[in-house]
Structure formats: structure tokens, C-alpha cells
Image: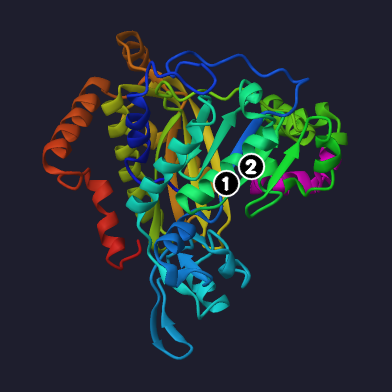
Amino acid sequence: MAFAPDGWTEKLYERFRDLQGETLPSGQDATAPALPEPDPEEEPSILHIDMDAFFAAVEQRDNPALRGKALIIGGVVDRLAPGEARVSPRGVVTTCSYEARAFGVRSGMPLAEAWRLCPDGIFLSGSHGKYGSASLEVMDLLRRFSPELEPVSIDEAFLNVSRCHRVQGRSVDIALAIQKSVRDELGLSCSIGIGSNRLLAKMASKMRKPAGIYVLSSEAAPAVLAPMPVQKMHGIGEAATASLNRLGIHTLGELAAYPEEVLVRRFGPHMGHNLKQLSLGVGSRVVKPFGYRREEKSVGQERTFGRDQHSLRAISSELLHLCEKVGGRMRAGGWLGKVVTLRLRSSGFVTSSRQTALPAATDRDRVIFDRAMHLLQNNWHEGESLRLIGVSVSGLVQASRSQWVQGDLLSEVAPERERAVDRAIDRIRGEFGGQAIARCNAMMRYSYRNGHNG
């Protein structure tokens, strides 16, 4: 999944907004509610379309000289002499062509490592505006095949074709037609997974990359998934993998055979049950048609440091700045949030996330920061190097007077005064820019960004 450029989501909604009332391929109106889930007894009809090496493919399409070359998107490498280069120590590979992958280059890898593996590769910073435009073209094309289109990122989407078989043929026929249209009309390539549910479709799209099609039904899923390492399952991250490995669980088959009650005791009721369901390939079959604006699920900000940080003062200063930005975005959207999540990445690229629930929904910078700091102090020790820090607020609800009052009763200090400060900062930043004003503690980040650590 590639990162979407700023404004891509808004452009996508704007693109489909004018289609309201249009007659669609399956006779479903763009503004109608989601259609019923497909019958699980029918053939798999949920498609997951995943563009192949999307950013790199767009560059190769637009510049024939790049075709067949090892292309790495993420940053420019200054070549100084044969075998020598100046590489940004913080840059990472956004994506790369399959020619570069043959050398071991992978998305998320430090640019310096990519250059070591592939010194003759072509390194580009990339053009997010170009990729955003190409993505809109892809989504336009997909929507011709079914109105039940749900983009999930700039380079992937779900499509429910259960209502389209009578006119367009079986799911595999539709997938083949999509691939041909993407290739002939857009000059790009995609892999398509066909599943009985969203989870299986997403897993299937990875099994025949690039430019392949794979069908994974609920009946076949247990046997197909069983030998896979648990970390290959969508939704099982590094921390969960490590915990499962300590229990002697290394494959999805071993996880499927593990007693659910033991998983619940170890991971809690929600995660324990979810892990069991994932191992069995159980997932939702609902694809929400793109005729309405989806509600925000979370608001977050993160920062990769210019160099690794190990000082609590420097890290907490950046964290406060991030919390201010999150709070400002929430107030601008009229949201209150109930859950604060902290995301950390070490210098060794180990990523962890921790979250805590709030006693009442809030959009106040100080409340968000206090909870985030509590998570930081319980999950990081001063002196340990951090590469990235992020904070997000989820469990969003629309602000109302009753929720404000509830927050007031549970607040520790002068909530009205703090809210007045938050609103004043929002107004100044709205008129003069995001850097026009900051709390004193947050301004410390300028010191370490200029080379002073702590």
C-alpha cells in the first residue's frame, strides 16, 4: 500500500460527487446505501485490485528510458565517484520497480541500504501529484465494472461484483477484463485477488504478483493459509507475531489449532478472538459503494526525526507539537476523540503502537498530550534511540455541548481557559500559517532539528 498525496482523498470524492443519479453498470444508484452482502454460497465475488509497483510503474510508463531499469522511488542519491555516493541517512524507499526488487530492494528500506544493494539503480524523489492523478484514473476505470467500489489507498481498492455476473460473466472474467483495461488504457499493471470476503481477497492479491489473478474461497482458505507464517497475515503486526512466536505459534495453521480461550486470556477478548478469526480466513464481505463520504476513523500525525533522538526533552517537545496539530485538525473537523494511540519506531526499524482510552471524548491539545506522554514514559526509556514518533486519536464522535460538559467535569485544570488558548492558536495559525505560533515547550524541536540533541 502506497502513501496517498495530500488532497487525493478530497479529489476522489469530488470526482464521484457529480455521478449521483447516474445509471451504473449493475443498475445501482451511486447514492444508494450499500447493497446486501453477497451470498457466501455463491462463487467468490469480492475483488481486491492492487496496482503493481505503482509509483515506479507510473514513472516507467511516462518515461520509456526508465523501462526495464532498476528504479527506486524515495529520494535522490548524489553520486560522487565510482562506488561512492551521498545518500540521505533518513530517506526510505517508497516503492521500487520489480527490476530493483531482484537486487533485494524493498519498500520501507533505508535509501542507504537500497544503494548498497543496487548502486547502479536509478533513484528518484517521485511526484505525488502525478501519482494522485494516475490513481484517480484507475478508480474511474474500476467504477465502470461495478458501482460497489471502495478505494482503500492510492493504489488499491475493493470491488464487489456479485451483482454483475449476469452481464459481465464470472468473477475471473471480470478480473481479466479489468487487467486488460488497466494495461491497454492506462499503461499500468495490477494484481487481483478474488475472495469470498475482503480478507481473503486481499491475501489472494499478493499470491500471484505481478499481474496475476488468484481465487481464494472460504472452503479452500484453511488449507491455503495453514502453512503461511503468521506475519504474512494482514492484520498481524510485529508485536503480535513476537508474542505468538513465544507461545510456539509460527504458522497460521498452528494459530487456527490453538484454543481460542487461551488466546483470549493472553491477548484480551477482542484481539484473541480476532486472531482466531484471521487464522481461519473469516472476514467481512461488505464493500461500501463510493456514493457518500466515509466518516473519519482517526486523526493522526507523525514525524521521522532528522537524526535519531534519545532525549526525553527533545522527544516530548516534538510530541507536543504533533498533539497540537492533531487537536487543531479535530477542532477544524468538529471531532472529539476517545482513544489516544502512540506510535514509536526505533533506530533498528522496530515499530510499536500503544493506546489508552480517555474518560471522556476530547479535542484538547493538553489532554491528548498528557495521555501520549503517559504512553511514552511507560514504553520508552531515556537514552534509547527513536527514529519516528506519531500520535493519533480515534473513536471519533461529532462534538456536542453535552460532550463538552462531560469533559469539563473530568478535567483536572481550567478547561475553559485551555480551550480558549487552543482556539486562539487555531485562529492565528489559520491566518498566518502553521509556524506562526507554538507553545514554548513545542518550540524546543527547532533546537534539535538544527543539530542539538537534548
Please state which of residues 300 and 78 is positioned toward the viewer in this rendering: 78
- Where is residue 221 shown, x and y percent of the image? 80, 36
Marks 1 and 2: in contact by CB < 8 Å? yes
Q: Residues within 10 Å of mark 2 (few under 14, many from 20)?
A: some
Residue pictured at 67% horizontal, 40% vertical: 193
Q: Which is nearer the eye, 158 or 316?
A: 158
Residue 207: x percent and y percent? 71, 49
Residue stretch in magenta: 232-255
* Amino acid type indicated by mark 1: Lys
Q: Which residue is mark 2?
A: 176
Callout 2 amino acid: Leu
Residue 403 in view of the camera: yes
Residue linked to disc 1: 180
Q: What is the residue that sits farthest to the top in this orientation?
A: 402
Looking at this rendering, what residue extends furthest in the front direction? 167
Is residue 378 rendered magenta in the image? no
